[in-house]
Image (cartoon, rainbow, N blue to C red):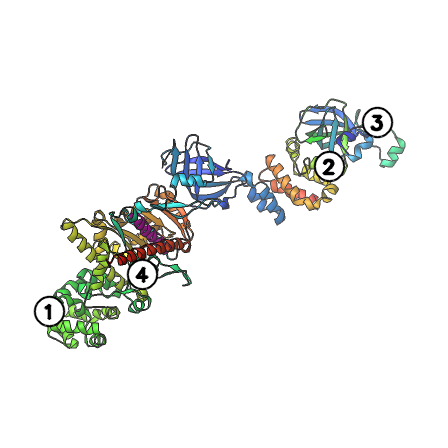
Amino acid sequence: MRRSLGRIVSGSINKGLIALLNKGENIEDYPVGALITIHGSKHSYLGIITDAGIESSDDIVGSISGSGIEEEFRVVAVNAIRDYVSRQKIEIALIGQYCDGVVRNADTTPSFYSDVLETSPEEIKMFFMEEDKKKLWNIGVPKTPKGIQAFVPIDVEKLVELSFGIFGKSGTGKTFLGNILAGYMVLYDMLRALEDPTCKRIRLLIFDMHSEYGLELKDNMGNIIAEGIAKIFSDRFVRFTPDLELAENRGLESLRINYCDLTLGDVALIAPIFGVSTSFLNYLSDFERILRKDVGLGDYWVWGLILDGHAQRRLERSPEGQKILNEIANKTKISDMSILRKRILDKIRAALGVGAELSFRSQTSKLRALLSYPYTSEERAIDIIVDNLISREGQNVVISMGRYEKETPLYMMIANLIARRLRERILEKTMAGEELETKIIIFLEEAHNFLGKETYRVSPFGEIAREMRKKGVMLCVIDQKPSELDRDVISMLWTNFVFTLTDKADVESALIGVPRAELFKKVIPMLGRQEVLIYGEAVRFPVVIRVEDYSKISRIFSEYANRDRENLNQKIDFLRKQGII
Amino acid sequence: MSWNSLTAHKESAIGEVTGVDAGRIEIFVYPECYPRIRVGSIIVVNSGETKPVGLVIRTAHRPRHGQIQPLRKTRSEILRSYPDLDKYHRFVSTIAYTSHIKGDLIFHVRASMPRLHDLAFLVESDELLDAFFRPNGAWNFDFLRYFLIEGAGPLEIRELFFTHREYFLSRSSDLKDIVEALTVALYKSGIRGNIARYLEDTLEALR
């Protein structure tokens, strides 16, 4: 028989229930976000503590505290009557109810003076189900007043069906969780393919700003904790990086950008990050037209924004740069970039006036950072990435930014280029009546760069979010400022993982679409490190869990990865013996 | 010493019941015992199987007949001149009925009422004081609820502790437990805003 912790004394399903704790209970044991069970007269209920507090019903404490009694006796006296004069109460948001063998969302309220109890491991299983290592995988331990040991699983099958979000302040554990979810998706796909080789495969595309999916995860001091998911499942991931040194040293594929692939929209998205003026942005479409047609640069128009004598000397130092200079010289019949620059300025002045010329002259210098990025005149990497994603025989892809982790414009260019190419290829396939062989999940860190209120309508990711769901492309939106995301984007997320957020607007944004959101608003700012509120399709009920230690889960991933590798080697050996390969 | 041995000898009685009025019992105190009785003294009334116990809340001393005449003498001169003077005086103590003894156990709850002329005995031994203040081995001042209802205030409570000061001081290591139990009893008695005053007065009496 479990000990009663308290009794329900007031409240409602929409505003939350109030329970008074029993004598002897310590309010300090009742953290916000903890699960609690309520035994009503007919049903059992599951709730989350959304607030906890104490109140004094008498001025007696004030009278003792303000008296001349010695401190030690004042404390004794107040403690002696604390149970009479104080009340410890918790506010509970009802989330689930159990009756007649059926678990469902709570739509009734427990009767007056219903018993409040610690949630048992059996109830956790009853309400959240149990890990089956197929589609249900343990994600962490739920928060409870006394700290029970029971796991809440995540339904990976449901998770990959629709887009989902991971939100939280920096350092709260988003990347750890992202790696865990990615790992479970890989396992889900692997194991499902073993059972049904004809099933639609899942492909992950992970934009990895801090190289913690492709290389190693680090703690806040920079110490390595464990290998990232793409490194653990190295046979199932192709790892790309724009950091050529990293590619060479750590065996990743290099990823260079072909600026010819950039559209006006791409440049308009990244240019403000370089600090160009609004006036320049207003002229940008005219500049593009002049550079493409009047100057004759065609697809090399972006180079026209940054090339001059200084840039030429820089490009001449590398074979890729020389190729680009040759292409430009062929197109414009000018091999001296100082002269080309002068011609560009003349054309702009003639077409748009002195103001536009001045704007071009002063603002393009801000775009010269493009010269420090890994550029190319070819575009193989992007196509290889997209081929991997849309082909049954392909692999998952991670783009680790390496030393460019703080270079948002480069990150945005890479992401936009891949997204646009991916969208084009998928549309080509579907227009041709072909069925897509894969379901693609794109992990997008710093998602507000692509899906913000201003960027959502113009970025390729916005188009993917809006159009591609039915074609099997989902987003894992990862961000620390959900309020900066377009409201439509958050509405599209069917499961959300919310770590602590303290800004009111962020909390409200993270809870868009949640029933009785007011109750959960109090929970999110109180979450500790690694604690996450999960709600949506992939969990049966909203729950706060402490995410399982990644280093522990990564060992499980490694075991599966090793088995997978052995299987693969056996197959290769077999095929070799048969003379097939 | 047990409760039974306290009441076993009628010679030990300090007086007898002369009136019962709800929660108050009036005791005629034998003149020679009068100086031993103070506010807060614990009196056991031998009423047979159930023995009412109470705390002295008021003491009185009046002439039995008519009015008193001024004598202009010292106490020793008076006693020399009138050795039987006390026979003409009435020594009365009123106790608040707070507890009862059944068998050898004390309960801080009232039971049956005493009858007139039942003998009254004064609790003075530390052993019985212990049994009264710590009936189950833990400090218990629940009897104060009746004491306060019958009209005791902070001063009577202070006098109660002062009357038994030696006893409480001999248990000074328990002072925190005493304060704890006293606070609970006062709270249960309905004392609210001025509970601190009661505690302050009590602690002063025990310094």
Viewer-nearest of discs 3 and 2: 2
**In the image, is A83 to the left or to the right of B133?**
left
What is the quadrant of residue A570 in the picture?
A: bottom left
Tags 4 and 1 touching, CB below 8 Å: no
Q: In terms of depth relative to the viewer, which is nearer, B158 or B128? A: B128
Viewer-nearest of discs 3 and 1: 1
- Residue B87's disc is 3
Tags 3 and 1 touching, CB below 8 Å: no
Q: Chain letter for mark 2, please.
A: B
Q: Chain letter for mark 3, please.
A: B
Q: Please rate how many residues cluster around mark 1, counting C-alpha atoms within 10 Å: few if below 14, some from 14 to 19, many from 20.
A: some
- Which residue does the numbered mark 4 point to in the structure image? A209
* Residue A278 appears in the rendering: no
Comes first in the chain, label 4 or label 1: 4
**In the image, is B199 to the left or to the right of A15?**
right
Q: Amino acid at mark 3?
A: Lys
Rounded to the nearest angstrom, the CA distance separating label 3 from label 1 is 138 Å
Q: Secondary structure at mark 1?
A: loop
